[in-house]
Amino acid sequence: MLLDIDKAASGMRQFTKQSVRGLGAIRSEVKLLQADFNGLSAATKLFNVSGGFSAVRNTLKTNFSFERDILELKQNSGMLKEHADELRRLAISSADSALQTPQEILAGMKEFARSGEQFEGIKAKVVEAARAATVFRTSVEEIASMDFDLTDKLNIDPSRLNRAHNMLYYHSKGS
């Protein structure tokens, strides 16, 4: 019986040694994985930083484009710098309530200017055109083109454009 106990003890020692070796190997693998993940983390951080730079670059590019379009609007319609600045502020301030971007509102302003509209006409019509574009699910530019025709060719007073838009929307949705 003593021999069996010695044999069992020997087996236990061997099992313990192999377990310790196995745990040591697992520990080494975990350290390697941790190093790999830390490297991945550094790469992810670098990627996020470059993504941040990309976002900044895109913002600057959008702002530059907006300012260039303001200058184009000013040049095409022959307006004063003060008028262009006022339309810039109008595009930015009315964007939220019209559910449009300032760039989209500016595109509508440019369409009015290309059609021959002057500063006062653009200022009077563009906010309603932006609101209507949201409702009709189209661009402010397309509504501006239609609004110019409504006021120029059909002699609809600009203050009544909202009624014309409501009528057109009502009849476009009727079956």
Image (cartoon, rainbow, N blue to C red):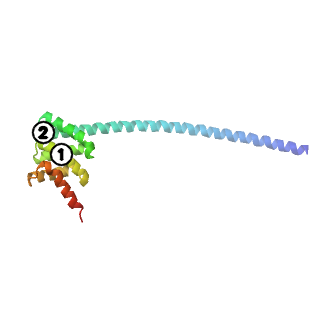
Quadrant assignment, res 45: top left
**Which mark is first along the chain, 1 or 2?**
2
- Residue name at image x 51 percent, y 37 percent: 39
Quadrant assignment, res 6: top right
Residue 83 to residue 133: above or below: above
Label 1 element class: helix
- Residue name at image x 15 percent, y 53 percent: 146
Position of the C terminus by quadrant:
bottom left
Depth order, front residue of 75/109: 109
Amino acid under disc 1: Val
- Image x and y of residue 10, in percent: 82, 42
Cα separation, mark 2 vs mark 1, equals 18 Å
Which residue corresponds to mark 2? 75
Quadrant assignment, res 85: top left
- Image x and y of residue 162, in percent: 18, 51
- Image x and y of residue 111, in percent: 16, 47
**From the viewer's perspective, is 58 left or right of 105?**
right
Label 2 element class: helix
